[in-house]
Amino acid sequence: MSEATASDLRAVGTRRDPYPARLERAWQDATAARLDSAPTVISTFAGGGGSSLGYAMAGYRELLASDWEEHAEECFRVNFPEVPFWRGDIAKLSAAEVFERSGLAPGELSVFDGSPPCQGFSTAGKREMADPRNTLFMEYVRLLRALQPKAMVMENVSGMVKGKMKLVFAQILRELKSSGYVVKAWKLNAQWLGVPQARERMIFIGAREDLGIVPTHPPAESTPISAREAIEDIDQEGDPDRAWLLEQWAKRPKRLTEWAAIPPGRNLAWVRKQRGGDPNQGFAALKYDPDRPAPTVVKSDSAIGLHGAMHWGEPRRFTRREYSRFTSFPDGYQWPGEWKDAVARIGNCVPPFMMRAVARHVRQTILEA
């Protein structure tokens, strides 16, 4: 579902409550007590917890999460203190240790989740076939074959089905299917799943062969939410991020002039083209259109340079709370560390509402079928 169908949108209808209220309700769902009978999930390549939060919003009980980055672990532990976390090279995480830490036996896990690093597939990068990150999915496959969960979910960027990267995509499908799963892969756009961000991701969903189920993907559940609607209720006056970000450009008059010249929804390349300059530079310097969903939030941003995401009403980058809203993290979610570290975690994550939709769908169509 790269775009919602007309029937999907008719079924969704008009939103009746504001986005911040829906975020708060989802946060209450995520932090509610879990029954022992709740479906279980283990997350690999968990990052700062976007997928984990989505599963929590859908009522799952997480038994273990893993990632190799220190700041990812810091973010995860502060938001999910009750979930065991394993940090290190996933190649060194044995199935025996997963079973020991989770208390499970083969075949007992509900869902095995993973988001192997995607930079080797991303259209924003060099798209190199030899990028070692392209093969990290095999560590996911190794653990999948040992755990034998009822269902598996794997996420990656949409760029993996473009050009020469299709070969790796085909290999991933072969490996997952040969692990004993019926697998379907589909491109989903987060803007149709309650996220105020136009972020496309390839979602693999698999059902263990003995269940006799052909997996499907969730339909659209929300018409697009604008960037303005996502953040307009935030009280900015006491936000230290905002004050600091405004200060960075206030000290650089050239930045203020360049920002003022860019209309909302346009980038610096567009301005240069209008002025007869080089239109091939400045694509990354984008001022958000407040009346459309936010573009894909990326991991690399600078508070000083012009290239990156820009607020439409103030000469600055977005705060971590604003980026969180664009990505469907509730206000109660914490981002310790510096602003740039938080942006990296948010830019790398799976939007929680996107994963909530996938987790609900898997629960209804596979686990409870």
Image: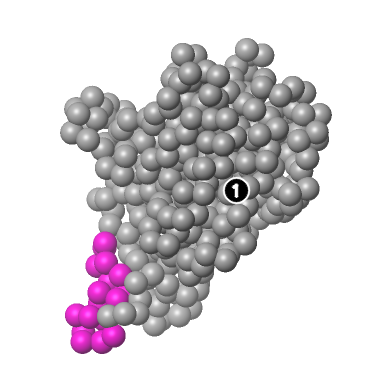
Residue 186 drawn at (x, y percent): 38, 40
Q: Nearer the viewer, residue 260 or 35?
A: 35
| Residue that appears at 27% across and 50% down | 292
Magenta segment: 259-278
Residue 254 drawn at (x, y percent): 39, 82
| Residue that appears at 40% across and 78% down | 255
Residue furthest bottom as drawn:
277
Looking at the image, residue 87 sits to the left or right of residue 202; the answer is: right
| Residue that appears at 52% across and 18% down | 211
Rendering colour mode: one colour
Task: Tell me the quarter of the picture where residue 132 sits.
Answer: bottom right
Residue highlighted by disc 1: 137
Q: Nearer the viewer, residue 78 or 242?
A: 78
194, above or below 283, in the image: above
Q: Is residue 146 visible?
A: yes
Q: Nearer the viewer, residue 203 or 199?
A: 203
Looking at the image, residue 199 sits to the left or right of residue 12; the answer is: right
Is residue 340 part of the magenta span, yes or no? no
Q: How many marks?
A: 1
- Neighbours of disc 1 within 10 Å: few (<14), some (14-19), many (20+): many
Residue 232 drawn at (x, y percent): 35, 46
Disc 1, SS: helix
| Residue that appears at 56% across and 36% down | 178
Q: Is residue 24 visible?
A: no
Residue 122 drawn at (x, y percent): 46, 60
In the picture, which quadrant includes the N terminus? top left
Amino acid type shown at disc 1: Phe
